[in-house]
Image: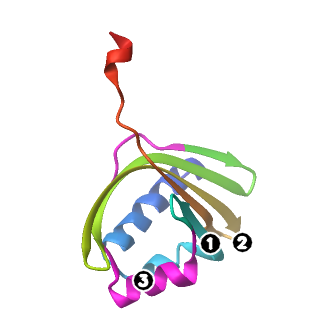
Amino acid sequence: MDNKSEIAELALAWAEAIVANDAAAIGRFMADEWVIVGPDGATSKTDFLASVASGDLTHDMMRAASEPRVEIYGATAVYTARVVNSGHFRGQAFTADEWTTDVFVRRGAKWQCVLSHATPAAKLDTSDFE
């Protein structure tokens, strides 16, 4: 399997762990220094996994809504896709349609994510194309 395919499969497996709401399984995909950056700022691995473990953050669904783009730069891989997901955060239901980018680093034989970034996807105004 080539590195691009390996990263695409890794991203799918990570999404499955997130939907299973299994903090230990989710954490195996992340480097210790992992952070996620989104509209509300940056969240550390420790804080993210604590939210999952406590039940404050749960996911019911997570899937790619676009063909992922994977680029490899030596021991670094960048995965980008439009992702839709749903769940609950502190008792409030949410749905999200986001462009996400994950940066993976190969450490030995294992890829680990060091950074995730999520940007809300804008609805496309098709009137500009008419």
Q: Which mark is residue 108?
A: 2
Give the residue at x 53% y 72%. Answer: 29
Vertical arrangement, residue 116 with respect to residue 74, above or below: below
Vertical arrangement, residue 12 with respect to residue 99, above or below: below
Residue named by callout 1 = 34
Q: Secondary structure at mark 3?
A: helix
How crowded is the residue under tag 2: few (<14 C-alpha within 10 Å), some, or many (20+)?
few
Q: Position of residue 70 (x, y in %)?
A: 56, 45
Q: Which of labels 2 and 3 is toward the front?
A: 3
* Cα–Cα gap, marks 3 and 1: 15 Å
Q: Which is nearer the eye, 124 or 19?
A: 124
Tell me which amino acid carries mark 1: Trp
Residue named by callout 3 = 51
Q: Which is nearer the eye, 65 or 119?
A: 119
In the image, the segment drawn in magenta is: 42-69
* Cα–Cα gap, marks 1 and 2: 17 Å
